[in-house]
Image (spheres, rainbow, N blue to C red):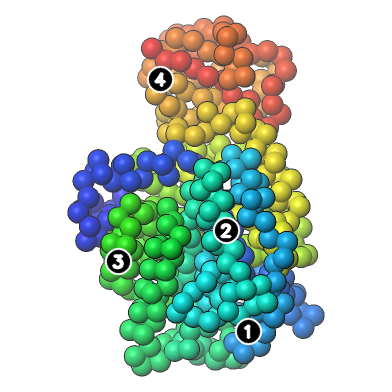
Amino acid sequence: MLTGAVMAQPATTESKAQHDQRMRWWREARFGMFIHWGLYAVPAGEYNGKRSDRIGEWIMEWANIPRADYEKFTNDFNPVKFDAKEWVRIARDAGMKYIVITSKHHDGFALYDSKVSNYDIVDATPYHRDPIKELAAEAKKQGLVFCFYYSILDWHYPAAYVDAPGKDPTAGNRTTKLRPGGKEEYLKYMKAQLRELVTQYDPGVLWFDGEWQDWWTEEDGKALYAYVRSLKPGIIINNRVGRGREGMKGLSKTDQTYAGDFGTPEQQIPPSGLPGVDWESCMTMNTTWGFKFYDDKWKSPEVIIRNLIDIASKGGNYLLNVGPTKEGLIPAPSVERLAAVGAWMKINGDSIYATTASPFSNQLSFGRATSKGDRIYLHVFDWPADGKLTVPSFGKEIKRAYLLIKPKSPLKFQHLDPAGGFTIELPAQAPDPIASVVVLETK
Ligand code: FHN
């Protein structure tokens, strides 16, 4: 059992070597697609003419929509333009190695064919097809790992109700209460759905969320963690299965052992690397997870690519979100940005995949760094006007330096004594305006 910042795996005996083996593909992947898709794509951020700056998938909460009214969105959820092959291609060509899709979000609607609920895409919508089945098969075909998001908070579960001023008891709300006996019932329901998801679709990760309910305890989290691992021992589970998460910072508190294999910072990047901790920063490309037709606050490709580099330089994964429309299309601004990231990854992917955190004790003034074996990858954001890149020492000698795009053209470098560190002579023009990679081979 490990305690504190390093995640622990309760109830399952696993050696460090076994743990490392189970986490390996995920640690090497570094970059994944998050997909928030569901009934909330129907109102797409507007209800009875009311809009909000709030996130789109919470419309049942911020528009105070009673359950019976929200259910009516099923009539308009018919994603005839959904194309699993195209979605997976977009993720793959962006350089993403895994996909995490919302099997069930807080609104309780199942995006797959659930046998324990009729509130799902096959039984309750005119679509009558299981897009998850197609997506899982296509991901396998194109070599990406297919994964699920699953919400513990469920605004649709009959035993759940809201007790908050001005709120309809069946509307959405940050917290719900469960009628007497409701928790045991709901636990059975959740386990039945999780068994369906794990045994029918074989996901690589279970990404829990909505765990902040008063009725959900760390013990519940540990038990659910053990249950899901008993269904698939090799699965990876995030730290939102239990109550360890420290708010949006996302890492687990250190006062005791908490369930979960990795931390989940949300919409933020930790200020510095976290040696020995597995973590993944999830982020929107605009300001909502679920589709909102009027949210055009899109991040630039530069911001997204530099986030990916920054996160990898701190030893983390980047889970970047798309919010498809009710027709089943990934919004064009998302597709464009993912293509731009993909163009950068096509050339520079080696400096991200299967790397570990920067060896430099301080943040580099000109950019970031990642390492892999005897190589250091310098990601230069700010290209030196004088063509001289000054690099601090990091405890190893350099054997060779070159641009990642020109491995056969060595770059000249000098050691700086006694200050330590060295300078590298770079070409006048930066190969890439967003981030150019210089490789250092160490002795
Ligand atoms: O409430 C959810 C939100 O809708 C979204 O799913 C994000 C994604 O990480 N998580 C929760 C907020 O922390």
For the residues labelled 3 and 2, the Cα–Cα distance comes to 26 Å
> Residue, x 43% and y 63% (percent of image)?
200
Which residue is identified by label 2?
A: 134
Q: Is residue 60 left or right of residue 254?
A: right
Percent position of residue 117, x then y: 49, 80
For the residues labelled 3 and 1, the Cα–Cα distance comes to 30 Å
Against 166, is 310 above or below? Answer: above
Question: Can residue 155 be seen?
Answer: no
Secondary structure found at label 2: helix
Q: Is residue 415 left or right of residue 63?
A: left
Q: Nearer the viewer, mark 4 or mark 1?
A: 1
Percent position of residue 257, x then y: 26, 59
The dot on residue 374 is 4
Q: Tell me the amino acid under the disc marked 1.
A: Glu
Along the polypeptide, which appears first: circle 1 or circle 2?
Answer: 1
Q: Nearer the viewer, mark 4 or mark 3?
A: 3
For the residues labelled 4 and 3, the Cα–Cα distance comes to 40 Å
**Tag 4 and tag 2, C-beta contact below 8 Å:** no
